[in-house]
Each structure stands twice: as structure tokens, then as C-alpha cells.
Amino acid sequence: MSAVEPLSNAYQNWYRFSRNPTAVIGLGIVVLCILAAIFAPWITPYPDHVGAVVDFRSRHLPPSAEHWFGTDNVGRDILTRVIFGMRISLELAFVVLGIAIPVGTALGIIAGYFGGWTEVIIMRITDIALAIPPLVMALAVAAVLSPDLINSMLAIASLWWTWHTRLIYSITRQLRTQEFVEAAETLGASKFHILFREILPNCVSAIAVKTSLDCGFVILIGASLSFLGLGIQPPTPDLGTMVAQGAGFLPENWWQSIFPGCAILFLALGFNLLGDGLRDLFDVEDVR
Amino acid sequence: MEFLSFLIRRILWSALVLVGLSMVIFFIARVVPGDPARMALGPRASAEQVAALQASLGLDRPLIEQYQLFLVGLSQGDLGRSLLTERAVNDDIRETFAATFELVCFTVFLAFSLGVPLGVVAAYWKDRWPDTAVRIFAILAAVTPSFFLALLLQLLAGYVLHILPTTGRLPHEMEFVAGTTGLMLIDSLLAGRLDVFGQALRHLLLPGIALAAATMGQMARITRASMIDVSRQDYIEAARAFGVPEFLRVTKYMLRPSFVPPLTIMGLEFASLIGGAFVVELVFAWPGMAAYGIRTILQKDLNAVMGVVMVSGAFFVMVNLLIDVLVGFVDPRVRIRGRR
């Protein structure tokens, strides 16, 4: 280990990051949720309550030592279902962004770098896709196809790339005239090299911030969809569905919808705080 | 002159977006699912019934022709017939859209009138306790799912406070039919019915807050960032050196140029606002477009669904056009280079 060099960027960044309380709290929440989601079958007290289990003797139990979050109207442990619900929410966010980010970034870089007709066509399509509210689109797709997780993911992803295209487009436009890009052009570098080796690395911090913020928003949209009964179908434990089902038992059995609701809030909060922290760290103020 | 050409360009462009939108919706409704007639009638309908419905919907013609028909219908404000209510979709939507429109307008008013001042307060006392308080509040408001907030507010009002009504637009016993505009607040004032106005406002309050929270949080955060940006400019320092009174410096010199980012973001926020309205309307039994949309979606009533998506999209495009023009009016630089 060469003593001084490794200390440089990564450590400095981590130091600055760790001095930012919101970012650290956000990271903590996100890591906690992801770990809980991965290890859900092993850490939850009643893993078999994920399915269509019915145990009427223990229905509507308030929070207690055995059932920290109480039980629902068919006697299932809510804590177990909340943790598995987080798993679904995170899957949704990762799949949607896994599609939206590569597509959006590639289109944004191409539109920003080449300009001309390429730019006009890509950015105009972006504007059209931007005119459809994602939730409404997901509703429409749920109407023509059957409402389930895959269809909601595709519906949301089919619009979500627009935000990334716009972001990367505006960054690329600024970078296009910078010296290092012109230098690469003069040296005869291929277009592919310029786009993905010269320009893309300069977009990474903006993408990171945007991704973190987006995770929160995609989770919120997914939860809204299942709250409306058009997302993930029971008995799969989805947080939005759980809130909707528990709403019928308010206010006496408040735990059935309040805890899943808080779980959504917690997830979205974590990703938002992390995104805000990264934004301060990378100093990319205009990413939302 | 230059403003006029900017205006024309923006209007033409919005029209183009609407055409594109119609293509997307047509594609979803006609190309993706296979057979809308079969879907509407269910698996037990006979082949003749399906064929008859296909013919009456024009589904037996070539796609290009179907799209032409759809476009012609759209340009005349005709969205076809709803299979669920057996009425013209545009009649159904016209009746329900007014309620949604009123809710959304009220929400925007709330979000702007609370969010911007909060942002100003946070920016003025940057890094002191009011700033921290506003930032925590704004982020919580932005990440609380609107349906969850709606439920919480309903709980609070229905079981604890008993002050505010939790469902509908007016009490059942109150007889008032919205007239010309369809907006309760305006119609009741036009009719001189102050009691109706008061009730309508009370009914709007909870759904409005539930829907506004997220946008208000965003407004506060953006106004704060934008104010801080402006406060670093030299002319603000100059104003201080010249002894311009503090209040005037903040409101006139700092707030005015800070207005553009919240205004533009407001336009984009509109998409999530329309989406959020679907959820909030359902919780508060608000008789808007969302309730209609969801009912028709569950019934696979394609004409109605296409209508709802088209109207939502068109609403979004119109609002953004309006905001662009407003921004172009406030900030002359935008007129020349275009915002996007």
C-alpha cells in the first residue's frame, strides 16, 4: 500500500460525506432496509405469513412482544409482512431504474452530443412522454393488461427514462464544448469513446444523486398503485396494498395500516436524505 | 414582437406534443392488448357479440383508419362512448373533471402560498434553527405517500377533531348544483350563496392539504436553494451597501428573481399532482375524474380510460404552456433561447 495515494479521493469524499448528518442517516436507513429485504426469510419472526395464511385465533392482535407490529385481519404478523413488503418495493425501484437509467442516459448523451435532428427527435419524444403522468400511465397499462408487478414496473419504466434523458442532455450540452472533449475529437477518438469514456464519467455524480432521489419516488408511485388495487395483487405482501386493506379497520386496529404506511415513508425518506447528502457532496445543485 | 413569436412557437409545440400523446394512447389502447371488444365483453361472450361490438367500435378497420377516426373524434372533442356508463365519454369527463380541476387548483394555491414563504424563511435564516425546521418539514412532506397522509388526516378529522368533513364536496343535505364553471367555490359566489362557499371550502381543505404536502415540500426546498443562489450575487451585496431596507432587499431584490425555478418546477410537479389526485380523490370520496377513471379501468372500459389519460395529459401540457408563457414574461432571457 503506497501510503499517501489511497488516502486521496475516496477517503476525502467519505470524510466529507460522514460529516453530513442527513446523508449518514439516509445511508443508514437505506442500508438497513436493503439488508432487511435481502435477509427477510431469515430475520422475520413468521416467514410463512407471507402467503395466504389464515389464523383466526390470532387476528387483530395489538402490538406485543410476540407481534411487534400486531397482526392483521386474518391473523398474520404485520412486521413479517412489512419486511417482505419492503423487499417488493425495493425490487420495483431497482427494476424500474435498471431500465430507465441506461436508456435515459444513452439517449441524453446522444441527443446532447450530436445535436441537430437527432437532438430534435429524441428531446421531442422525451417531452411527449413527459406529458403523461406516470401514475396515470401505469393505471392505463393496468387497464389493458392485467394489474400485476411486472406490468406496473414496465409502465413506470416506460416513462421514467425521460427524467434521466433531460438531465444527461443538459449536462452533455455543457460538456460538449469543453477542452477535453475537443482534445479527444482532435486526436481522432471514436464517437463511442467520446460519448462513453469522456462524457459519461462526468455525468456519474449527477446520475447517482438522481438515482437515489428517484428510488424514493418510484417506491411512492408503486405504493400508490397498489393502494388503488392496481399494482401487486394479494396475498403478496405489498406495503400499499396493506395500507389499503388496513384502512377498513381504522381507527380501532390502527396498526394494520399505520405500520406499513410508516414503512413506505421510512424507505422514501432514506433515499431522499441520501440523495440530498450526495448532492451536497458532489455539488450538483440542479439535480432533483 | 419577440414575445409573440415565442408564444406562437410554444403553442405550436404544445399542439405537437398533444398529437404525440394521442399516438401513445392509441398505441396502448389498440395495439398492446389485442382485442378490446373481447376484453370488454369477457370470455363468455359469443363470437358474434364480439364481432358486433368490434364493428360498432370500428375495430374491424385498418389501424391507420382507426387512428384517423380517433384523431377526428379528438379534434371535435369526441372521445367515443363509455361501455360502462353507456354515455359519451366527454360528458362523463366534463362532469367529473370540474371537481378534479377545483381540487388541483386549490392544491396549487396551497402549495405555492405555503411553500414559497417557508423557503424564504429557510433561506433567510440559513443554517439556523428555522432553516433546519423547514428542511425537516419539507422533506417529510415530500416523502409521505399522499394516500397515507390522506388517511391520517381523515383519522384526525373524523375521530379526533370532528371539525372538518371527510368526504365529498358538500354536505348531503345542502342542495346546490354547480352551474356554469362547475367549480363550487366560484359558482357559489356567483350565486351569492356564502353558506355553500363556506361548506365547499371546508370540504376542500383536507383533500387539498393531503395533495399539496409533497408539492409544498418541493416548493420550499427549491425556493430556498434559489434564494440562496441569488443572495450570493453581487447586486444583493450592493443593495446592502447602499442601505436598501432589509425587507425590501429580501422581497424585491431576492425573491423576485428567485421565483422562476419554483414556477418551472411547479409545471413539472403537475404530473405527480394529477397522479396524486387519483389517490386522494379515492380516499376522500371526491367525485372527480379519478373515481371515474378507476371505475372504468377495473371494468376494462377502454374508451373511457383513453379519455381520462388524454385529458390528464392535455391538462398537463396546457399548464406547462401557461407556465412557460408566464416565465417568459417574468424572465426575458427565456423568450430568446427557449427554456428547454
Image (cartoon, coloured by chain):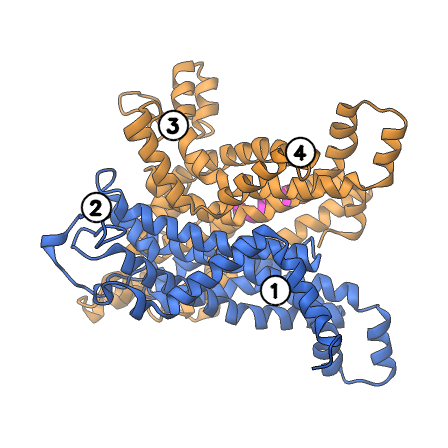
Chain colours: A blue, B orange
Task: Tell me which chain the residue with mark 2 is part of.
Answer: A
Query: For the residues carrying marks 3 and 1, which lies nearer the camera in this image?
Result: 1
| x and y percentages locating residue A214 in the rendered image | 53, 59
- Name the residue rendered at 65%, 45% in the picture: B264
- Rendering coords of residue A230 (x, y %): 33, 57
Q: Are marks 1 and 2 in contact (CB under 8 Å)?
A: no
Mark 4 on the same chain as mark 1: no
- Dot 4 alpha-carbon crowd within 10 angstroms: few under 14, some 14 to 19, many 20 or more: many
In magenta, the rendered stretch is B315-322
The first of marks 1 and 2 along the sequence is 2
Real-space Cα distance between discs 4 and 3? 29 Å
Q: Which mark is residue B120?
A: 4
Chain letter of disc 1?
A
Q: Is residue A210 above or below residue A253?
A: below
Indicate yes or no whether the magenta region holds residue A114: no
- Report which residue position mark 2 lands on: A62
Of A64 and A192, nearer the camera is A64
